[in-house]
Image (tube, rainbow, N blue to C red):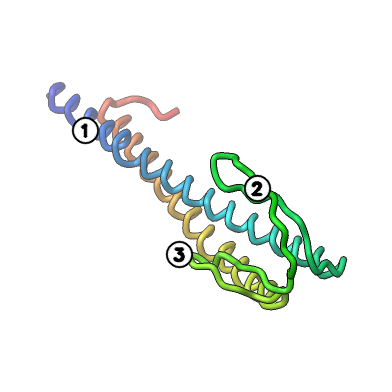
Amino acid sequence: MDRCREEQVRRFEDFVDRRLKPDLVRAIAERDKVFEQQKIYSDLKRNIENLEKNGVTSLRSLVNLGSEVYVQSEVPDTRYIFVDVGLGFHVEFTWSEALDFISVKEPRLANRQIEEYTLLIASIKAQIKLVCEGIRELLQLQSE
């Protein structure tokens, strides 16, 4: 009987270590990506509002080419900007169009995606706790 119980405990522990914990790490990383997207849109909105407020029509900037290599760039006309709309697509917007897009995109990120990942994370944590309780019962340990 003890050998059977030990085998069940080992299988439960393997399930937690090989399946549930990596799923939890992945879900947290995906939620963090959504938080990062939300921050990028918020920063873009703030920058557009500052450009509008200050009446900027041209600007100079440093652009990261990758691997922390920067090049100086000059934007002679700032009326249009390209915004990453997802799936690798960028759309040319006027400032007001970009602000409209951001005002739609930000709540969608906050309400749908972040909430979905938060619920998924809570579900995975509950599953881990349930399996740990099952292991505790198999080992006939007292609840802590």
Q: Which residue bears the numbered disc 3?
A: 87
Viewed as shown, does residue 68 lie left or right of 16?
right
Please rate how many residues cluster around mark 3, counting C-alpha atoms within 10 Å: few if below 14, some from 14 to 19, many from 20: few
Q: Residue furthest right?
A: 54
Type of amino acid under label 3: Leu
Front: mark 3 or 1: 3
Residue 8, percent across and down?
Answer: 19, 31
For marks 3 and 1, the one nearer the N-term is 1
Q: Which residue bears the numbered disc 2?
A: 71
Relative height, residue 4 to residue 68 (above, below): above
Q: Residue furthest top?
A: 2
Viewed as shown, does residue 69 lie left or right of 11?
right
Viewed as shown, does residue 27 lie left or right of 50?
left
Cα separation, mark 3 vs mark 2, equals 26 Å
- Classify residue 90 by image quadrant: bottom right
Residue at figure coordinates x 27%, y 25% from the top left: 139
Please rate how many residues cluster around mark 1, counting C-alpha atoms within 10 Å: few if below 14, some from 14 to 19, many from 20: few
Residue 38, percent across and down?
Answer: 61, 58
Relative height, residue 125 to residue 40 (above, below): above
Type of amino acid under label 2: Val
Cα separation, mark 3 vs mark 1, equals 39 Å
Residue at disc 3, secondary structure: loop
| The one of 47 and 109 positioned closer to us in this rendering | 47
Cα separation, mark 2 vs mark 1, equals 55 Å
Q: Which residue bears the numbered disc 1?
A: 11
For marks 3 and 2, the one nearer the N-term is 2
Residue at figure coordinates x 32%, y 36% from the top left: 16
Q: Locate the N terminus and report the quarter of the image it occupies.
A: top left
